[in-house]
Amino acid sequence: MTARLAALDRLDACLPLLPAADENASELHGRARTLSDRLETANLAVHEAIRAEIRSGARPDMLLHWAHALMDRNSARPSGVHHYDSLDELVTGVLGFDEPEDSGIRPEPEKVLYQPTPARLIFNLLEETRLTANDVLVDLGSGMGHVPLLAAICTPAHCIGIEVEQAYIDRARQCAQRLHLRRAHFIRQDARDADCKAGTVFYLYTPFSGSILRRVLDRLRHEASTRTFRVCTYGPCAETVAREPWLKAEQEPQAQRITVFATRAASSTRQSSA
Ligand SMILES: C[S@@+](CC[C@H](N)C(=O)[O-])C[C@H]1O[C@@H](n2cnc3c(N)ncnc32)[C@H](O)[C@@H]1O
């Protein structure tokens, strides 16, 4: 598949450059288009085979195989900070999502517009957190649900997405239903009102800022006065979360990476919030 994607990348780059008016070029254009269509059809067959494996409830070996192959291939290439790559194409294809569309949702102060976590970082998150059947992953501001969906496919954890926009919740639920994912649940709710009692790992890809983030962190801090859990971040919110005295980063917080924070002992949390 990696060679096929490399060929598709090259064809995509060359096709617009061939002058359609030139007779020789137009024959070449036709052959290139036919080849590109055949490669795309082969990709769709791989996506369907992976979906069938997921629906069967078996370990997602095929998905993990291709994900690691693509991560190896992509890691050798120069990259931008929040870039998407062929692994995102694979994940989007398997989940059956189109590119994020304009759903008419408009920006509001402190509310960050939808953008999915790049797929390689979701795999990083799963590797760092090593979720077990006792874990409940809660994505606060889950968009179309890439993180809870992939976590439910690749780990035995229960996975919850909290998202304020109904259109995204509908897409995530449809996907979970199509793939028979019984451990992925999506709740249409403002994260400020979310029930934090079940979560053992909370994930925030900078979904909001300012007073909304403050309110959510205060609720999590209150929860941390009774028990331990982890908070994972991606994007600029890592900086704010790193200043919370009741959390300790497991590694140096970085906006471009997944940062995992663990709650400090419940007793020190009670003191810091007193
Ligand atoms: C940057 S996207 C992250 C999406 C998803 N977590 C991911 O990583 O793929 C932020 C999401 O948070 C949602 N959001 C913003 N404010 C919210 C709030 N107060 N409660 C719940 N969701 C919210 C947005 O609608 C958007 O879908």
Image (cartoon, rainbow, N blue to C red):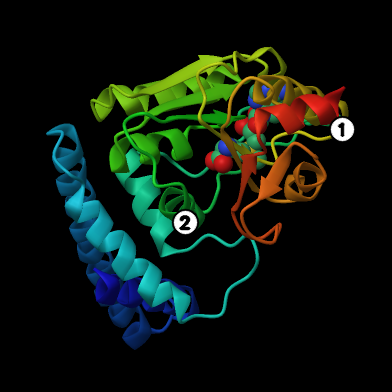
Q: Residue at the spot x=34%, y=37% of the render?
A: 132
Q: Nearer the viewer, residue 10 or 210?
A: 210
- Left or right of 129 in this view: 27: left
Which amino acid, mark 1? Gly
- Image height check: is 9 above or below 150? below
Residue drawn at (63%, 59%) of the image: 251
Q: Is residue 85 above or below residue 3?
A: above
Q: Residues within 10 Å of mark 2 (few under 14, many from 20)?
A: some
Label 1 CB-ligand 1 distance < 8 A: no
Q: Which residue is mark 1?
A: 210
Amino acid type, residue under disc 2 in the picture: Asn
Left or right relative to 171: residue 255 = right
The spot of residue 75 in percent (x, y) is 46, 75
Residue 12 location, quadrant: bottom left
Q: Can the viewer see residue 101 in this picture?
A: no
Quadrant into which the C terminus falls: top right
Q: CA distance from mark 1 to mark 2?
A: 27 Å
Q: Is residue 30 above or below residue 205?
A: below
Disc 1, SS: helix
